[in-house]
Image: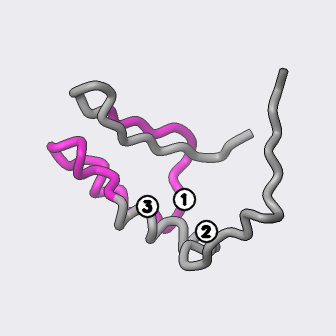
């Protein structure tokens, strides 16, 4: 159950760029129209979006309390 996905990946030699769902108000949509697909969704842009979503990117996760869920 997602609201928005943005994919930018080098899938074996060719860059793929895809989006689904409605853009959030803070998204910088002009980036998505760049000619070079690798420049459409950079790590700097990802960090900016994560901050706008309230994801704590500057804090190391507490891995000692993490859970691993496996489907067998």
**Tag 2's secondary structure?**
loop
Q: Are marks 1 and 2 in contact (CB under 8 Å)?
A: yes
Q: Which residue is mark 1?
A: 24
Which sits in the foreground, 19 or 25? 19
Q: Does the magenta portion include 32? A: yes
The label number, if any, that marks residue 53 in the structure image:
2
- Is 48 drawn above or below residue 70 in the view shown? below
Quarter where residue 16 is shown: top left
Q: Marks 1 and 2, how far apart in space?
A: 10 Å
- Is 12 drawn above or below residue 66 in the view shown? above
Which residue lies most toward the front here? 64
Q: Are marks 3 and 1 in contact (CB under 8 Å)?
A: no
Whether residue 35 sits left or right of residue 25 in the image: it is left
Badge 1 crowding class, 10 Å Cα cut-off, few under 14, some 14 to 19, many 20 or more, is few
Please report the bounds of the magenta region as a residue range.
16-42
Of callouts 1 and 2, which one flags the residue occurring earlier in the amino acid sequence? 1
Of callouts 3 and 2, which one flags the residue occurring earlier in the amino acid sequence? 3
Which sits in the foreground, 11 or 28? 11
- Is 8 drawn above or below residue 65 in the view shown? above
Name the quadrant of the C terminus: top right
The label number, if any, that marks residue 46 in the structure image:
3
Foreground label between 3 and 1: 3
């Amino acid at each position: 159950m997602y609201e928005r996905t943005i994919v930018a990946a080098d899938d074996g030699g060719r860059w793929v760029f895809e989006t689904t769902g409605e853009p959030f108000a803070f998204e910088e949509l002009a980036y998505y129209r760049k000619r070079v697909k690798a420049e459409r969704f950079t790590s700097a842009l990802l960090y900016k979006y994560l901050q706008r979503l309230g994801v704590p990117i500057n804090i190391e996760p507490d891995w000692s309390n993490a859970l691993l869920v496996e489907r067998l």
